[in-house]
Image (spheres, rainbow, N blue to C red):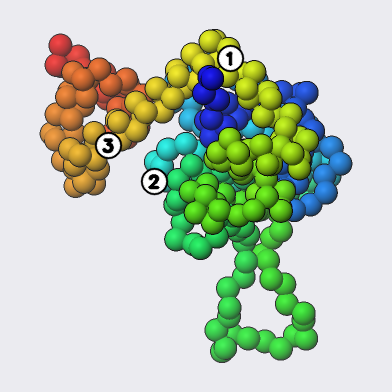
Amino acid sequence: MINRLPLTSDYVFKRIFGQEDNKSALKDFLESVLDVEIYDIEITNPEIPKNYYDSKYGVLDLKVTLNNGIVVDVEMQMQNEHNMEQRLPYYLASSYVNSLKEGEPYSNCKKTIVINILNFNYYKRNEYHSIARMKFEKPKPEEVVDMGYQEDVYATKYLEMHIIELPKFKKKNPEIHTKIAQWLWLFVGSEEQVKKASKVNKEIEKINKKLASMSLSSEERNNYEFRLKAIRDEADAIEYATRNGIEQGIEQGEEKKTREIVKEMLKNNFTIEQIKKVTKLTEEEIDKIKNKNS
């Protein structure tokens, strides 16, 4: 029996949920996470980029517009690159800004939601599904003015983040009584758990069959392996840089040490993009070091 391609791969996730004929399943999944009824969705970036296997492309996200105009950016994060605190607000802010066309007033901005599914634990929180919004902090007593208001809780309701940490979900080991549990077992469950979820949710049954069919394709398996290799190479580059103390070296302005690291990475066949990412140097600066070393 052939092993099923993992839905925890960002390539597999987008390849499955980016298809128009799987739109009803994507809608069902989004309803389970957002806990709202959705009447219709539009997938605005269904295509897989030609350079999907290139580590510089980053996460293969899926952008969706709901029937009420809300913009949702769904991302599957396979490896912990230790930058979620910076990455999440970046994607949230980018999606929010891009929802406004040139010349439109700010009142036309659409509520933006980022759903980040992590195949690792990141936040020191005790739930597997965390929801974050921009809330007001508790005021200092000396700054309180009695205006008779029923106070606002949120500074804005237009920005919302959902973080799902799959290892925490597995540790919780919930029954399939909720829709979100049914879907998450499809991501990380055993064959028996996936069968149980499929019996109670026809959309999950449909996606499970699509996954099985996709897993039989040698082309899709090769595409998955290409993407996985790119992500592993990226992780190796970061580990290499950390192991050689390059981050500390750059912070301290140790240019000589940085140059030696670049030379070593070039010798070990790291790509320019990987070197750029871990050294924060430009391509031109790396080329200068490369040419001097030739």
Marking on residue 239: 3
Disc 1 versus disc 2: distance between alpha carbons? Answer: 34 Å
The kind of secondary structure element at disc 1 is loop
Q: Residue at x 40, y 23 (%)?
A: 230
The kind of secondary structure element at disc 3 is helix
Q: Does residue 134 sit above or below 216 in this rendering?
A: below
Marking on residue 149: none
What quarter of the picture does the C terminus occupy?
A: top left
Of marks 1 and 2, the one in the foreground: 1
Whether residue 10 is visible here, answered yes or no, is: no
Disc 1 versus disc 3: distance between alpha carbons? Answer: 34 Å
Which of marks 3 and 1 precedes in the sequence?
1
Counting labels gives 3
Position of residue 235 measured from the top left corner of the image (x, y, whole percent): 34, 33
| Left or right relative to 143: residue 45 | right
| Left or right relative to 251: residue 177 | right
What quarter of the picture does the N terminus occupy?
A: top right
Neighbor class of circle 3 (other Cα within 10 Å; few <14, some 14-19, many 20+) is: some
**In-front residue for pair 251/166:** 166
Position of residue 22 measured from the top left corner of the image (x, y, whole percent): 75, 27
Is the C-beta separation of discs 1 and 3 under 8 Å?
no
Is the C-beta separation of discs 2 and 3 under 8 Å?
no
The residue that disc 1 covers is 216
Q: Does residue 164 sit above or below 287 in this rendering?
A: below
The residue that disc 2 covers is 82
Position of residue 115 measured from the top left corner of the image (x, y, whole percent): 62, 45
Callout 2 amino acid = His
Q: Residue at x 51, y 16 (%)?
A: 221
Q: Residue at x 63, y 24 (%)?
A: 211
Callout 1 amino acid = Leu
Specify the quadrant of the image occupied by residue 255. top left
| Left or right relative to 66: residue 254 | left
